[in-house]
Each structure stands twice: as structure tokens, then as C-alpha cells.
Amino acid sequence: MLALMLPFGLAFGGLAAIGAVSGIVAAVLWRRQAAPRQDRGAEENAAPTAAAISSLADDLAEAVNRNEFFLVHQPKMRARSGEVQAVETLIRWRQRAGEVFVSLEALMPVLQVLVPTILYVVGVATIGIYVSSALYIALFMIWQGKFRWWLAALVAIGVPVALFLLFEVWFLIPLPKGPLEHLLGY
């Protein structure tokens, strides 16, 4: 048996779609207000303001007028047999053209981790894994963690030395080495 589930109101045209989507959003907002979730902050659990609800309603109306909603059909399958039991239809809201995907404020923390990590990978290829790891740990601890320089230096030297002894000396597993390790005879 194959069933097709459609969101309420979509078959009746644009106004019904606005009503259905608005009803879904209102239910989500009501649920957040009625039963706050522990994993959300106070701002996300706060009751929506009239301006926020009005703005959301305006955005939904504009989205329907610009055909930004589209349907995605997703099969519901039985785990053991792989047989399709039902098909679920989901409403997706296409991002408006011309809007920025992510703001610069949201991108900065990502770049603060991504750029040093890329430099670390380049460092592994050029100066070896142990020296590159020591530099990465020290600079990251000082820059992002705001640790004191002597603690960062202690950890940055201790971790690669411990891993060098573990892999190179104890287990005899060669890892990518740079000029310093070659000077030491490894």
C-alpha cells in the first residue's frame, strides 16, 4: 500500500498555502512559548513579538507571490525490506536571490578556525607534523583560548613530543616529518 501525504491546504492554491505555512509557523512559535526547550537560549524561547509575527507573515506572503516555496517528495521506507511504505511531501522555502547566505559577523568565527587549520595542513606538508602541530597548538591557545604564553608553550611542546615518542619510537609508525625530525635522525 502506498499513501501520499500532503500538507494541509496546499492543494487549494496560494492563499491556502499562506494559511497552511502561517499555521505551521504559528504552531512552532506557540510551542516555543508554551514549552521552552532546555537546549535553546532565552532569546529563542522568548514569546514572539507582534512585530516579529507581522514581519514573518509579510515574508511568507512575499515568498508565495514570488514562488519561493517548492515541494520535495520524500519516500518513507521500511527498514528491513526497503519497501516504500508512503511518500511524504515537504514544503521548502528557497532563499531569496540577492540575500547574503551568511553575514560577516557569523562568518568570522568560522574563518578564525578554518584559516589556522588550513595553514596547519600546509605546515604538515612542508615542515612536518610535529613542528606544525606545536605551532598550531601554541598559536591557537594564545589567540583563541587566551592562555598565558608559557602554558601554551608547555602544552605545544609536550603534546607533539609525547606523540613523537608514541608513534615513532614505541610503535615505529612513521608520520610526515620535516627538516627538524630529519636533523634528529628520524
Image: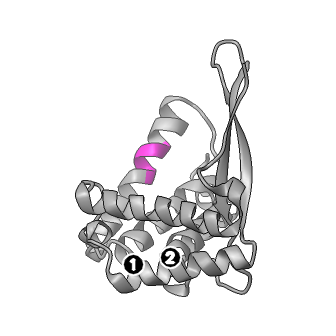
User: In this view of the protein, can residue 74 be seen by the observer?
Assistant: yes
Query: At which x and y percent is residue 158?
Result: 36, 54
Q: Is residue 102 visible?
A: no
**Which one is nearer the viewer's eye here, 171 or 90?**
90
Q: Residue, x 64% and y 13% (percent of image)?
A: 80
By secondary structure, the bulk of the magenta-drawn segment is best described as: helix
Secondary structure under badge 2?
Answer: helix
| Residue 31, quarter of the rendered image | bottom left
- Report which residue position mark 1 lands on: 143
Residue 28 place in picture, x, y as percent: 40, 59
Q: Is the residue marked by circle 1 packed among few (<14), some (14-19), or many (20+) residues within 10 Å? A: few
Asked whether the beta carbons under mark 2 and mark 1 sit within 8 Å of each other, the answer is yes
Disc 2: which residue? 112
- x 30%, y 76%: residue: 146
Left or right, 114 with reference to 64: left
> On the image, which quarter does residue 132 sit in?
bottom right
Q: Is residue 135 above or below residue 182?
A: below
Q: What segment carries the magenta color? A: 160-164
Amino acid type of the residue that numbered disc 1 sits on in the rendered structure: Trp
What colour scheme governs how the chains and residues are painted in the rendered image of this protein?
A: one colour
Given the current orientation, which residue lies at the most extreme top position?
Answer: 81
On whether residue 114 falls in the magenta region, the answer is no
Residue 9 sits in quarter: bottom right
Answer few, some or many: residues within 10 Å of disc 2's Cα (few below 14, many 20 plus, some between 14 and 19).
Answer: few
